[in-house]
Image (spheres, grey):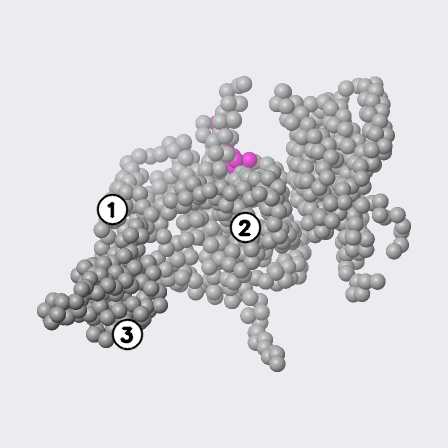
Amino acid sequence: MILREIFFFLFGGTAVLCGLFMLTRKSALSGAVSLVVCFLSFAGLYAMLDAPFIAAMQVLVYAGAIMMLIIFVIMTIDLSAEERRAEKPVIVGGIIAGAIVAAAIALYSITVRGLPHITGAARIDGSVTHIGAVMFSKHVLNFEMLSLLLLVALVGAVVLGKKKAKEG
Amino acid sequence: MMNSDWMFLGTTTARAVFMWGLTLVFILINIFLERKICAFVQDRVGPNRAHICGVRLFGFILNFADAVKLIFKEDILPPFVNKAYYIAAPAVIMTIALMGAAVVPFADDLTVGGFTLPMQALNLNVGFLYILALTSLSVYSLVLAGWGSNSKYPLLSAMRSSAQMISYEISMGLSLVGLVMVFGSVDLGQIVKAQGGLIAGVVPRWGIVVQPLGALLFAVASLAELNRTPFDLPEGESEIIGFHVEYSSMKFALFFMAEYANIFVASAVFAALFLGGWQIPWLTTAAIKEHAAPVFRTVSIVALAAMMAVAALLVRFYRKRPYQWKDLRRIEGPVLLSALGLGALLAVAGIVASYVITPGPIMAALLACGLQMAAFCGKSFFLCAFVILVRWTLPRLRYDQLMALGWKIMLPLGLANLLVTGLVLLLKKG
Amino acid sequence: MAIIVKKAKLNVFEKVYIFEIARGIVVTIGHFCNSLINPHRLPTLNYPEQKRRLLPNYRGRLRLLKNETGELKCTACLLCVKACPANCLTVEAAPATPGAKRTPARYDLDVGRCIFCGLCVEACPFGAIDMNSGIYELADKDPARFIFTKEKLAQERGPQ
Amino acid sequence: METTWYLYLAVAIFFIGLFGVLVRRNVFFYLMSIELMLNAANLVFVACARQRGDINGQVLAFFVMALAAAEACVGLAIVILFFRKRRSISLDSATEMHS
C-alpha cells in the first residue's frame, strides 16, 4: 500500500534530516530539540513496524526522559561563556570521517544488495500484554539485571552529581 | 476503496472530530467555570455584563468577548527572542492538549446494522501510555517557551516547571500500574468495560473503589502535571513569574487554552480510569437496550425535574433582585425561562412518547450511546469543576514542599500501592 | 533579636493533611452553594443599577452655594484658590460696583486636576462652597468637559 | 514496506551518529550522537523482529532503551561534575583523568 511508503519516507526523511540538523547546530539546545523531533519520527517508524509499545516507550523514555534530562542539564550549565568561545570545527577529522561514512555506506549497500530483498510478511502482536509476557518469562533475568543497572546508575549519578562540602 | 473502508474512514473522522470538538467546548466551559466558581466561592457575582441580545447565560458569553479581545490585541514579538522556539512553544502545547482526549472512550461500542464501532477516537492498545507520552512531550513547550523568550525569568520558570513535571510523571505512571494490574489491560476502552461489574452486587466496580490510593495519587499527580493550583509554580501568576511572561495576545491565550483543554483531558482520563468512564452505575448497556422505554421515561422525568429546579431558582433570583436593568438584559429572564419551558415541553413529549412508541434495536442502541456519552460528559464536567474548586481552596506549595511531596511521599506510596495490589491479586488467584 | 516561631503541634489527622484539605473543600463548596442558591444576597453592588449610599461627609465635586435670595454666596476673595494644592481653581472677581457685594465673574473648576482634598471648603470664610454634593460620576471622554464653569457648579444640587 | 529499507535508514542514522561522535567536541553533542546510534540499533531490532515475526527483537529494543536511560543518567552526572571542575564542556579540555 502506497500509504505505508509515504509514511516511511516522511518519518525516515525527518529522522535523517533532523539528525543532520542536530550535527550542524552550534547551540546545544537547538541540537537537542532537533534530536527530539528525530526521536519522535523514530516512534512513528516503530508504530509502523507493529511495535506500538516500543513507539510509546520511545516517546516516553527517549523524548520524555532522556532528552528532557539533557535539555535540563544544558539549561542548568551556563553555556553562554562556552558558546561564545565557538567550538573549533574538526575539519580534517570531519572530512576523513565523512569519507569513511561514505565508504562504509557504499560497502554496506553492496553487501546488502547481495542479500535477498526481505519484506515484512509476518504480523506480530506488539501489544503491552504480549511483550510483558515475553519479558517476564523468557527474559526475566535480563530484566532484573537491567533494573539493577538502573539502580546502580541512579545511585552513581547521585554520588557524582553531589556537591562536595568543600571543593578543592 | 471498498465501502467498508469509506465507512471506517468516515466514522473514525467523526469520532476524532467529536472528541476534538468536545475538548474545544470544554475549554470554554472550563473558563466559564473558573470564573463563576471563583466568584461564588469568594462571595462575588462574577461575570455578569457581556451579553448577546441581553442573554448572558450566567456569564458564559464573556468567553466570546474575551476571545475577541485577545485576537485583536497587539501581537508583540519581542526583539531578542529565538523566533522559532518562541512561536513553536504555544503551538506545541495546544497541539498536545488537543490530542490528549483521543484515547478516552466516550460510550460503549455502538452496534448498528452489523457494524460495531468502538466509541473512542483512537483505540490504541497502548492506552494510557499514549497519555503519559503526551504528558512528557508537553514539557517541551515550557522549555521552548522559557528558552525561546531569551529572558531570565521565563528560563528559571521553565526549569522549575520542567523539574516539577518530570518528577510527577513518575508518580503518575506508578499510580496507574496498580489499576492496570487489577483490570488486566492498558487500553482505556478495556479498562472502562471492566469497570461495569458490581462488587458484592452493590458497589460499582470502579477504579476508585478498587484502587482508592491509586486514584488519590493520580489525582494529585495530574494536578501537578496540569500546573493547577496547589502546584502552579510554573504559572505562579501572583508571586513568581511564569514561563510565559514574554508572550502576548493570542500566543499567550494559547497557553491558557491549552491549560483548560488539559484540565478536560485529565478529567476525562480520570473519569475513564477511576470513575467508570461512560458506565452508568447499576445500568449496563444490555439493560438500557432491553428496557429502552422505561429508561427513556426516567431520563425525561429527571431532566424535567432539573429544568423545573433551574427555573425555580431563576424566578426566585429575578423576583428578589433589588434593582432593575435598563438595557437589553431585562429580556434575559423571559428568554431563559421560555427556553427552559421549551425544554420542559420536550421532556413531557419524551415521557408521552415513551408510553406510545416501542423503540427498535437501533433506537435503543442510540439511546444507550447517548446516555453513556452524557454520563461521560457529566463525570468530566464535575471533575473539571472539582479541579477548579481545588484551585480556589488550597494555597500554593513552596518549591521544596512540592519536590518533597513528589519524591518522598507520592513515590513510596505508589510503590506501596503496587505491592499491596500485587499481594492481593496473588492471594485471590490461589 | 530574632524571634523563634514555634511550630504548632499537629495531631495525626492534621499531619495526614488530606482530611484538612477535604475540610477546606467543604468550606468552599458551602460558600459556592450558598452563592448559587442566594445570588441576590451577595454583597456585590451592581453599580450602575445600584448606587452606594454616601456618607454625610463624602467629598464629591465642589459646588457653589447660594443664599436665601438666590445669589451666590461667593465673594471672590480667592482664599480657596490660595488654599488649593492642585491649582484646579480659577477665580476672577467681577468689577466692583459700589454698594453691592463682590461676586465672581469666573469660577472655573478643573476636576481633572482636583484631588478632592476639601481644603478650599475649609478656607472659605463665607461658607460659600462645599463638597458634599454627592456628585462623583465625573468620568468623560472629552477633557474639555472636565472644566466646570460657575453656572454649572452653582446649578447642580446633590443630596443635602 | 520492505525491511531492507528500514535497514538502510538505520545505517544512515547510525553513521550520522558516528559522524557526530567523531566531529563534535561539545560533550552534549557527543552524548546525543551516542543516543542516535543506539536508536539506529533499535530500529534494526524492531525491523528484524517484524521481519521474523519474533517479539524478542522488540524486547531487546526495550532493553536498549533502558540502557540508554542509564547511560544518559550517568553521562550527564559526569558532565555536570566535569563542568564544575573545568568550567567547560568541550571534550578537548578533558585530557587528563584526575584533577
Q: Chain of mark 3?
A: C
Residue depicted at x 60% and y 79%: C3
Indicate the quadrant where residue A20 lies.
Answer: top right
Q: Which residue is mark 1?
A: B328
In percent of width and height, residue A158 lies at: 76, 57
Residue depicted at x 50% and y 45%: B248
Give the residues in magenta. B114-122
> Which comes before the other along the chain, label 1 or label 2?
2
Q: Mark 2 is on which residue type?
A: Val
Q: Are marks 3 and 1 on the same chain?
A: no
Q: Main secondary structure of the magenta part?
A: loop
Say left or right for B139 vs B277.
Answer: right
Q: Chain of mark 1?
A: B
In percent of width and height, residue C66 lies at: 15, 68
Q: CB under 8 Å between callouts 3 and 2? A: no
Residue depicted at x 25% and y 73%: C124
Numbered badge on residue C122: 3
Q: Mark 1 is on which residue type?
A: Leu
Is disc 2 placed on a helix, strand or loop? loop
